[in-house]
Image: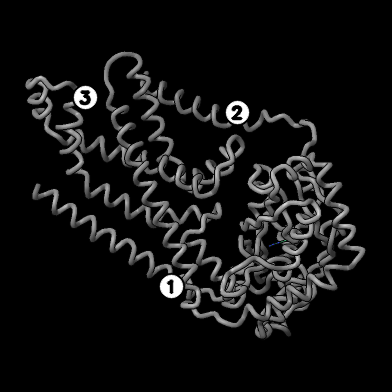
Amino acid sequence: MKKRVGLLLAIITALVMLVMPLGTQSAHAADTSLQDIQKKGVLVMGTSPDYPPYEFQATVNGKSKVVGMDVQIGQKVAKDLGVKLKIKSMSFDSLLVALQTGKVDMIISGMNPTPARRKNVAFTNTYYQGGYDIVINKTDAAKYKNKDSFNGGTLGAQTGTTQYNAAKKQTKNTQVKGMTSQSDLILALQSHKIDGVAMEKPSAEAYVANNKQLAAIPSKFNMSSSATSSAIAFRKGSTSLVNKVNQTVAEIKQEKLVKKTYLPTAGKYLKTNTVNTSMGHYWQAFLTGIEYTLIITVCSVFFGFIIGIVLALARMAKGGVFKTILRWIATAYVEFIRGTPMMVQVMFVYFGLGLFVNLPALTSGIIAISLNSGAYVAEYIRGGINSVDVGQTEAARSLGMSNGRTMRYVILPQALKNIWPSLGNEFITLIKDSSIVSIIGVTELIYQSNIVRSDTYRGVAPIVVIMVLYFILTFTASRILNYFERRMQHA
Ligand code: ARG
C-alpha cells in the first residue's frame, strides 16, 4: 500500500514539474521581434503545401519544392526585411502551435485572420481575398448546387480551417469529415468516400483546372470578410515586425502583385506538375526517406539501450533511502512511458521542450523515441538479469568479485544472450514505429510518401511503394539479427 502511494506521488510530481513552466511564461516582454529576426538573418515560414495556388509541392528541375503565391509573398517579406527565407512544411493544424512554440517565425498558408486566431497570434493586414467553393466529382454535377445539397451526404474539409467550422455549423443533416491533408481529401473525394470538399475558391479552381474529373460549385457559406481573406501571422506582441511587414503587404496590394505575377507563376508550376507521376521518378525522395528512417532507428536503439540498462539497474536497486527513491523514479518512468502514446511523447518533446530549447525535428524525434524505447528495453533487461541463476552471482562473489564487476562480467553478458531475441524485436518495431516522427516533419519514409502523394495526386501507389520498402528493411534486419543470434549460441 505504502509503495503504491509513493509511486502515485512520484508520477504526479513528475507531471506537475513537466506542465508548470508552460503556464508561467511572461506575457509582456519588450517587443524586439523586428530586431531579433534581422539579427538572426533568417525568417522561417511555416506553411501547409497542399493548397494550390497558395502553396503546393511541385517538381522543379527534378527536385520537389514548395511553390505558390504564398511562397513568393514570403520571399518578398524576407527580402524587404533583409533576411533569408526558410520554408518549413507541416500540416495546417500544426501551424499555430509551431508559431507559438518558436518552431517557425511566421505563417503564410492562406490563413484567415479570424477573431479566434487573433487571440493567440498577431496578423498583418490581409493580402488576398478568396471566398469559398466546394469541389465535387464532375459526374455528380447535377446533384449538388451548394452547401445545402449535401443533406444526407458527406462534406470534407481540412481540420483546423475556417471552412471546417463553417461546414459543421452551416449545414444540416450533413456529415462533416475532417482530414489533416487537403490532398487526402481530394483522394477521398475521387474514391467516393466523401461527396465534396470545401476550400477557398482559388484552390478549388486550381484543383479543377488540373483534374478533368472534378468540378467546383459555390459554397454559399455565410462568412465575414476576415474569414474569407488571408493574412500573415506572427507571434503575439510582435508589433514592430508586423508593422514593418504591413509595408510589404501594402506594396503587394498596391502593385497588384498577386494577380499580375504571383498567380500566373503558380499556374505555370501547376501545369508542369502533372508531367511525371511514375513512382520510379521519385526514387530520390524514397531513398532519403530510407536514410532518415535508418538514422532515427539506429540512434534510438543505441540510446534506448543505454537508457534501458540504467533504468533496469535503478529498478533493481535495493537497500537505503536513496536506492528506494531511485527505484521509485525508474518504476514511475517506465509506467508513465508505457502508459502514454509514443505520438504524444514525440509532440511533447518537439513542441513542449521546444519552449525551453529549440530542438530540430530530427533531434527531437530521436530523443523521444530513445526515451520511449528505453522504458521497454529496461523491462527486457530486468527480465534477462532475473533469468540468470542466482548461483552465478554467488559463485562470482565468492571468487572475490565486487557487486559491480559481477554485474558487468558475469550477469549482463548472460542476460544479453537471453534477451537478444526481444531486443531484435524492439529494433524491428522501431523501424516501423519511427514513422510517427513524420508528424513533426522529419523527412523519413512516411513523410516522403506524403510528399509524393501530394506531388502526384496518386493515392495508392506511394503507399504500396513504402510498404514494400519497409518490408525489405525489416526483413533484412531480422536476417542480420538471426545471424548474430546463431553466433552467440555457439560462443
Ligand atoms: N482559409 C482556411 C483557413 O484559414 C484554410 C487555409 C488552408 N491552407 C492550407 N495551406 N492548407 O482556415
User: What amino acid does circle 1 point to?
Assistant: Val
Rendered location of residue 488, percent (x, y): 14, 48
The residue under the point 55% across, 55% down is 441
Answer few, some or many: residues within 10 Å of disc 3's Cα (few below 14, many 20 plus, some between 14 and 19). few
Say which of marks 2 and 3 sits in front.
3
User: What amino acid does circle 2 point to?
Assistant: Met
The residue under the point 33% across, 67% down is 472
User: What amino acid does circle 3 point to?
Assistant: Gly
For label 1, the SS is helix
Answer few, some or many: residues within 10 Å of disc 2's Cα (few below 14, many 20 plus, some between 14 and 19). few
* Location of residue 317 with respect to 94 vertically, above or below: above
In the image, 123 versus 117, the foreground residue is 123
In the image: residue 145, left or right of residue 414: right
Between the C-alphas of marks 2 and 3, the distance is 38 Å
Between the C-alphas of marks 1 and 3, the distance is 50 Å
Say which of marks 1 and 3 sits in front.
3
Q: Earlier in the sequence, mark 2 or mark 3?
A: 2
Q: Which residue is mark 2?
A: 20
Label 1 close to label 2 by CB (< 8 Å): no
| Distance from mark 2 CB to nearest ligand 1 atom below 8 Å | no
For label 3, the SS is helix
For label 2, the SS is helix
Is residue 372 visible in this depiction of the protein?
yes
Rendered location of residue 220, percent (x, y): 82, 69
Rendered location of residue 470, percent (x, y): 38, 64
Q: Which residue is mark 1?
A: 464
Question: Which picture quadrant has residue 36?
Answer: top right
* Location of residue 274 with respect to 225 vertically, above or below: below
Q: Earlier in the sequence, mark 1 or mark 3?
A: 3
Between the C-alphas of marks 1 and 2, the distance is 44 Å
